[in-house]
Amino acid sequence: MNRSFVHNLLFALLMGMLPLSVSAQKEVRKNIRKGNKEYQQQKFSEAYTFFENAVKANPSSKEATFNLGNTLYKQKEWDKSLEHFNHFISLEQENPTEAAAGWHNIGNAMLQKKDLQKSMEAYKMALRLNPQDNETRYNLAVAQKMIQDQQQDQQPDQGEGEQDQQQNQQQDQQQQNPQDQEQRAEQPDQPEQMSRDNARQMLQAIEQDEQQTQEKVQQIRAKEREQQAEENKRNNKNW
């Protein structure tokens, strides 16, 4: 076969494929634009369809992948949104700021899943790539505060432990030194001792007050966590 004929045939084939490639890219851009329009109008289900079509046509489209993750996040599909955010990070190897936005949104999704440790790690990754991002820094502080509160709630109340210890020491002293106790009772200058019934009533009143205080503190903490979570739900980073 004539070599020039082969070259001409290959050239014709390539030229024939080129319009298809350009046409496909135009279709991807068209779906992304439509998806963005629906997303801005908070029509997330419709936006999802356009972004999904764009990703199917071009799985390497960073913009379509990122926006698809955001749309799934808005629909509370945390796990599915994480898949696309992670895929976006694997695609974005050139722009640290854009990669940081992906990690930021991973942190948000992890926070929604109540995985506070992974959320904190994702925010830290975002800050390593974009140290100037104050929104990510704020969200990191929220995640760290929630972890602290969680750890404090799991720890026993040290004050009560110390109080029990002091009471046990006093009881031990009374058992070990009954003679001293009797001598103190016989001295006229000593104040009148409180009866056991009165002491028991006072102790119960103190314990009740402490319980009410703890309940109020827990309610306040729960309200703060809800407010922080609501604040953290503010706009995910968009493309």
Image (spheres, rainbow, N blue to C red):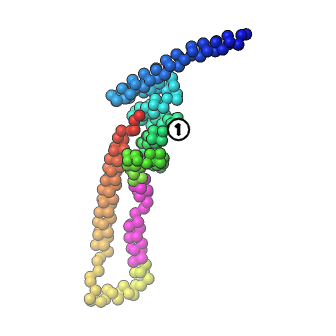
Q: Residue furthest front?
A: 4
Disc 1 crowd, CA 10 A, few/some/many (<14, 14-19, 20+): few
Location of residue 9 with respect to 167 vertically, above or below? above
Query: Mark 1 belongs to which amino acid?
Result: Gln
Q: Is residue 156 magenta?
A: yes
Residue 122 in view in this figure = no
Quarter of the image where the N terminus is located: top right
Residue 174 horizontal/vertical position (percent)? 40, 81
Q: Which residue is mark 1?
A: 93
**Figure quadrant of residue 217:** bottom left
Residue at 41% across, 34% down: 239
Report the span colored magenta: 146-170
Q: Please indicate whether residue 194 sits to the left or right of residue 84 in the image.
A: left
Residue at 37% across, 29% down: 39
The front one of 67 and 222 is: 67
Q: Is residue 188 magenta?
A: no
Residue 12 in view in this figure = yes
Residue 3 horizontal/vertical position (percent)? 70, 13
Q: Please indicate whether residue 209 sits to the left or right of residue 172 in the image.
A: left
The front one of 55 and 155 is: 55
Q: Main secondary structure of the magenta part?
A: helix
- In this rendering, the count of numbered labels is 1
Residue at 46% across, 20% down: 27
**Figure quadrant of residue 172:** bottom left
Residue 34 horizontal/vertical position (percent)? 39, 23
